[in-house]
């Protein structure tokens, strides 16, 4: 028998002293519900205790209410007794189970906790699985795994974020958080991003984005440059080419929810413009769950309706004899898209379905959708069967966990743009310039996007200045405004619209405006200004609605290229400068730019300028797509970094996520379980109490449909933070609201309560 039994026990039943391992004091037992805990001070798990934290006093420790996280029966002696291994990871132990125990607790001396910290149950179970079933060496290194706590030699020494960044080319093992799909996992690179400076945030985002282009290794998931992915892209491009050469009664439809739908709009309208320049009729159409209003504001509820997705596709394609349908769902989870794909599979004589996502097929969502027995997994399985005969196509490379867990607007959005623009560009080149679609050509085109990421992050210093300025504005209760031209302005609108569901931001915290308004936007439904001020998006709207109240605490960002009317940019810049000195610019130019002198005038008006110079390209459209991706990376960094600095991120989780559909409801429940260590049922109860603002759930609430919960949550704010504070502190909902009112940063609110 190994020296550290994990059977339930307590000090009453097991009074043996703790064992010192290095500097850590390891308890020989885990208290369980069958045994009363000796005291609040002794029965404390410090889930919030991290390097750099000031240790609380003994009286403060006595008020802690965080119970030990329990070890369940499926991972007791039976599972561990069969494990065998070595201490190659450097852990001093007499056996593999002892090493495991050290990994699980990795405690440090602390008078507040009786001498040790304890991991959350999910973290413990994951490590058991890894040790029992085999673990890559690097996954056991305590400086790599984000869930392993290390002994601390100095409680007041702040750990630099740079020390915890593994090589950028190394993705987490598939065994990292194995119960989650890749797109929902937390990224070990950014586990401390909530404590990072602006410069460190930009560096971390750079490392995460570099993971998109990691080469396939061994038996891991297929990647962006994997042979199977490139071959599938080649096949899809040839299908598009056939439609371009014979467009009568044919159509290419791109569809998605949230960010995926907005990128479907951006890509479809962009390629329609390219066709117009060639005197061709438009062939591309887009569908976004929630209609055109979802282009500018969060409309998450329609994402759960597969019937609505099917009907919208059927209506759009009525009378067509050939349709290539491209459904985008980064997590392979959106019921809206699943309904459309299922409709295509039932009508293969007209439709050829293509699914774009970034999880392995076996990780597709496998639970019945509202109103039907269909699951996303069943749709994916049918598409895989048809892929052998090229009646359906599946493009699902993995790009690694997002920098902010589950925020697929970042790498998921970028990879969507890379995949689809590469496919459609190859098809256009084949149809109109007689350039054959080849494996090598597809690969080279994607490599240009890899260079785009490198070129963009070569300006990390300028990006840091933008993040700092935007962060200071949000911390001061002011706003960030993007003033853009052309398709780069559309990316500003997209980035701003994503801040509400991602960070719980108000619509006017981050706003986008486009020169020409809805005329330039070219959306199907036309102007939406009658829906409210958040749908006023022209530069004229900015001048009339925002400019009069502008101060130096607001951050204004100009976004344009050398192809725009620089005189118009300068005119607007001077108007802004009269009200605020906090003006910045993102500017794209090519070698030999003739507007450089005029640009110098604009630079003189700005506090900082991020000017990116690109080599002269063979294709103007290809360059413009690179500008778009570069701008997307910059704006994602600005809005994400600003909200991190404001305190909207807990570790690397979207702590203030809006619980407005089933996907986000499940994500919120998992997040609460991960951060609190409590059972799933208890976390869901806490979430519902925060949604309905009650301390006790009534039978009516408990029996309500999930759609009722998400509808109610759409009218609430700070649902997840309230639930987490209640779980971590044991306080009532009203007490949690009061704490968050005084201290909106969740970590600080919990710390204040416990101290």
Image: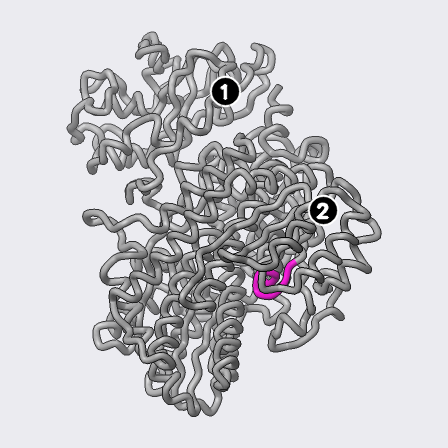
Dot 2 alpha-carbon crowd within 10 angstroms: few under 14, some 14 to 19, many 20 or more: many
The quarter of the displayed image where residue 540 is located: bottom right
Could you tell me which residue is drawn at 46 percent across and 59 percent down? 626
- Looking at the rendered structure, the number of numbered marks drawn on it comes to 2
Q: Which residue occupies the foreground of this view, 386 or 693?
A: 386
Q: Which contiguous range is marked in magenta?
A: 484-490
- Judge whether residue 568 can be spotted in this image: yes
Rendered image: mark on residue 158: 1
Residue 263 appears at what percent x and percent y? Answer: 50, 64
Q: Which residue occupies the foreground of this view, 266 or 447?
A: 447
Could you tell me which residue is drawn at 29 percent across and 27 percent down? 141
The quarter of the displayed image where residue 661 is located: bottom right
Rendered image: mark on residue 605: 2
Could you tell me which residue is drawn at 50 percent across and 52 percent down? 613
Which comes before the other along the chain, label 2 or label 1? 1
The quarter of the displayed image where residue 543 is located: bottom right
Left or right: where does residue 84 sit relative to residue 187? left
Of labels 2 and 1, the one closer to you? 2
Q: Looking at the rendering, in which quadrant would you find the C terminus?
A: top right
Residue 718 appears at what percent x and percent y? Answer: 64, 44
Q: Examine the rendered structure and indicate whether residue 469 appears above or below residue 557.
A: above
Residue 703 appears at what percent x and percent y? Answer: 55, 55
**Mark 2 and mark 1 residues within 8 Å of each other at the beta carbon:** no
**Structural distance between the alpha carbons of marks 2 and 1:** 38 Å
Q: Looking at the rendering, in which quadrant would you find the N terminus?
A: top left
Classify mark 1: helix, strand or loop.
loop
- What residue occupies the far top of the structure in this picture? 17
Residue 669 appears at what percent x and percent y? Answer: 49, 46
For the stretch drawn in magenta, the main secondary structure is helix
Residue 487 is covered by the magenta coloring: yes
């Amino acid at each position: 028998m190994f020296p550290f039994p994990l059977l339930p026990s307590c000090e009453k039943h097991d009074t043996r002293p703790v064992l010192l391992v290095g500097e850590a004091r390891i308890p020989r037992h885990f208290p369980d519900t069958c045994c009363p805990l000796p005291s609040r001070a002794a029965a404390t798990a410090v889930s919030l205790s991290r390097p750099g934290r000031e240790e609380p006093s003994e009286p403060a420790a006595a008020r802690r209410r965080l119970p030990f996280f329990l070890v369940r029966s499926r991972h007791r002696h039976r599972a561990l007794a069969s494990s065998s291994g070595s201490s190659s990871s450097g852990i001093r132990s007499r056996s593999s189970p002892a090493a495991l125990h050290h990994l699980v607790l990795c405690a440090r001396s602390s008078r507040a906790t009786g001498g040790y910290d304890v991991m959350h149950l999910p973290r413990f179970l994951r490590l058991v699985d890894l040790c029992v079933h085999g673990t890559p060496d690097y996954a056991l290194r305590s400086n790599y795994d984000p869930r392993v706590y290390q002994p601390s030699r100095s409680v007041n020494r702040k750990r630099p974020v740079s020390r915890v960044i593994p090589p950028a080319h190394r993705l987490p093992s598939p065994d990292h958080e194995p119960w989650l799909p890749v797109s929902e996992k937390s990224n070990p690179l950014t586990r401390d991003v909530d404590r990072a400076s602006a410069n460190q945030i930009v560096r971390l985002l750079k490392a995460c984005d570099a993971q998109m282009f990691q080469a396939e290794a061994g038996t891991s998931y297929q990647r962006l440059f994997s042979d199977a992915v490139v071959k599938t892209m080649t096949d899809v491009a040839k299908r598009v080419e056939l439609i371009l050469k014979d467009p009568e009664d044919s159509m290419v439809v791109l569809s998605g929810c949230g960010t995926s739908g907005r990128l479907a709009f951006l890509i479809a309208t962009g390629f329609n413009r390219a066709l117009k320049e060639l005197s061709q009729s438009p062939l591309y159409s887009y569908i976004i769950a929630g209609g055109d209003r979802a282009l500018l504001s969060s409309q998450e509820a329609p994402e759960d309706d597969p019937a609505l997705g099917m009907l919208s596709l059927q209506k759009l394609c009525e009378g067509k004899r050939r349709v290539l349908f491209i459904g985008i769902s980064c997590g392979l989870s959106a019921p809206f898209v699943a309904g459309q794909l299922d409709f295509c599979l039932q009508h293969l004589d007209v439709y050829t379905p293509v699914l774009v996502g970034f999880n392995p097929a076996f990780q597709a969502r496998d639970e019945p959708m509202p109103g039907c027995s269909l699951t996303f997994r069943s749709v994916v399985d049918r598409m895989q069967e048809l892929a052998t005969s090229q009646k359906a196509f599946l493009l699902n490379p993995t790009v690694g966990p997002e920098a902010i867990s589950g925020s697929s607007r970042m790498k998921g959005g970028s990879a969507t743009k890379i995949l689809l623009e590469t496919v459609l560009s190859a098809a256009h080149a084949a149809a109109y310039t007689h350039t054959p679609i080849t494996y090598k050509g597809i690969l080279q085109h994607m490599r240009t996007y890899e260079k785009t990421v490198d070129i963009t992050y070569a300006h990390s210093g300028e990006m840091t200045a933008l993040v700092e300025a935007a962060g200071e504005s949000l911390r001061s209760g002011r706003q960030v405004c993007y003033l853009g031209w052309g398709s780069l302005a559309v990316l500003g609108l997209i980035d701003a619209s994503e801040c509400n569901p991602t960070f719980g931001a108000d619509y006017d915290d981050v706003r986008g405006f486009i020169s020409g308004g809805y005329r330039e936007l070219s959306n199907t439904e036309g102007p939406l200004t009658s829906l409210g001020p958040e749908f006023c998006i022209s530069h004229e709207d900015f001048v009339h609605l925002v400019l009069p109240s502008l101060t130096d605490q607001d951050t204004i960002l100009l976004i344009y290229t050398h192809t725009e009317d620089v005189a118009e940019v300068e005119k607007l810049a001077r108007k802004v400068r009269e009200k605020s000195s906090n003006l910045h610019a993102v500017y794209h130019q090519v070698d030999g730019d003739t507007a450089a002198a005029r640009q110098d005038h604009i630079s003189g008006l700005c506090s900082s300028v991020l000017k990116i110079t690109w080599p002269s390209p063979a294709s103007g459209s290809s360059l413009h797509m690179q500008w778009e991706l570069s701008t997307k990376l910059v704006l994602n960094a600005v809005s994400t970094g600003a909200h991190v600095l404001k305190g909207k991120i807990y570790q690397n989780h979207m702590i203030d996520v809006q619980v407005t559909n089933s996907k986000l409801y499940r994500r919120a429940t998992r997040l609460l379980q991960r951060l609190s260590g409590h059972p799933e049922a208890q976390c869901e109860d806490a979430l519902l109490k925060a949604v309905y603002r009650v301390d006790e759930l009534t039978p009516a609430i408990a029996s309500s449909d999930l759609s009722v919960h998400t509808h109610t949550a759409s009218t609430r704010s700070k649902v997840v933070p309230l639930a987490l504070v209640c779980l971590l502190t044991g306080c009532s909902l009203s007490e949690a609201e009061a704490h968050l009112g005084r201290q909106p940063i969740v970590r600080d609110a919990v710390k204040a309560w416990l101290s």
